[in-house]
Amino acid sequence: MSNTHSTYQAQWQKYSAKESLWRWFGWLMFVSVCIYCWQVMNKDTMWFFVVDAPNQVADITGRMWPPRWSYMEQLWQPLWDTLNIATLGTLLGVVMAFPVAFLAARNTTPSRAFVRPVALYIIAASRSINSLIWALLLVAVLGPGLLAGIIAIALRSIGFVAKLMYEAIEEVNKTQVAAITATGASPLQILDYAVMPQVLPNFIGTSIFRWDINIRESTVLGLVGAGGIGLKLQESMAVLAWPQVTVIFLSILATVVVSEWVSARCRHALI
């Protein structure tokens, strides 16, 4: 009996010979792709600059210190503009994402053959294009200013909010929907009394979370002329005013930390 048991342990394998072969083949392909990508990435790399990077970092860091705190007086208005871009852009994006989410969900869309694919395309297009690219396009169309930044943030937010919300709509408790339906409620009443109470906490949490993300994204929109503190950052870097860049970096960091705290408190209070 003991000899049979030891023989069984010696022969047992987690994967069959065929599965092991496919696993080794998969790892070989993965390593090959990584090596190829590394070669492509470093094809035009000038290694002299890479080797010299520590010296450049030390030089720029030395120029950035000490910060020019007097420059902070010129940053209050751009910071306020940045907050407005993020807040108004998020609000506009949430308003547009709300109907898109219901049109994209399988259990609430009026047409799975036509309407739902269009809604999913809107979500995919919004999520595929970065807010900086949206801002670049809108600045070319609308001209530089806060409006381009607000619309860019809104267009970027539609896909994020709508995707998470339509997934929540599809996962609602069907028992509650069936109970409201059995009372003879209309489709609008079913949405109001059976679907909305279940997805509203998710919708609020997602919207606040997106606002927190948009605070970060709106800080760089000024680099393409969409207003906000990014415009001051571009101006300071253009004239090599590194002490001012330090102040801008610290103010952005402080703004992000405060927005993180505010969003966490809001989610805790509302959800």
Image: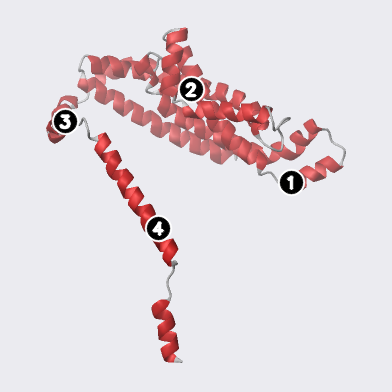
Cα separation, mark 3 vs mark 4, equals: 37 Å
User: Does residue 170 appear in this view?
Assistant: yes
Question: Viewer-nearest of labels 1 and 3?
Answer: 3
Taking the spot 27% from the left edge, 17% from the top edge, the residue there is 71
Residue type highlighted by circle 2: Ile
Question: Viewer-nearest of labels 1 and 4?
Answer: 4
Question: Viewer-nearest of labels 2 and 4?
Answer: 4
The quadrant in which the C terminus is found is top right
Residue type highlighted by circle 4: Arg
148 relative to 70 in the view: left or right: right
Q: Residue 261's spot in the image, x, y percent?
A: 45, 36
Taking the spot 41% from the left edge, 16% from the top edge, the residue there is 136
User: Colour scheme of this structure image?
Assistant: secondary structure
User: Mark 1 or mark 4, which has the lower sequence index?
Assistant: 4
Q: Which of the 4 quarters of the picture holds residue 10?
A: bottom left
User: Which structural element holds mark 2?
Assistant: helix
Cα separation, mark 1 vs mark 2, equals: 34 Å
Q: Label for residue 174?
A: 1
Residue lying furthest bottom: 1
Q: Is residue 241 above or below residue 31?
A: above
User: Which structural element holds mark 3?
Assistant: loop
Q: Which residue is mark 3?
A: 46
Q: Label for residue 23?
A: 4
Q: Is residue 196 above or below residue 20?
A: above
Residue lying furthest right: 184
Residue type highlighted by circle 3: Met
User: Mark 3 or mark 4, which has the lower sequence index?
Assistant: 4
For label 3, the crowd category at 10 Å Cα-Cα, with few meaning under 14, some 14 to 19 and many 20 or more, is few
Q: Is residue 137 above or below residue 63?
A: above
Q: Which residue is mark 2?
A: 153
User: Mark 2 or mark 4, which has the lower sequence index?
Assistant: 4
Q: Along the line of sight, which residue is nearer the eye, 196 or 100?
A: 100
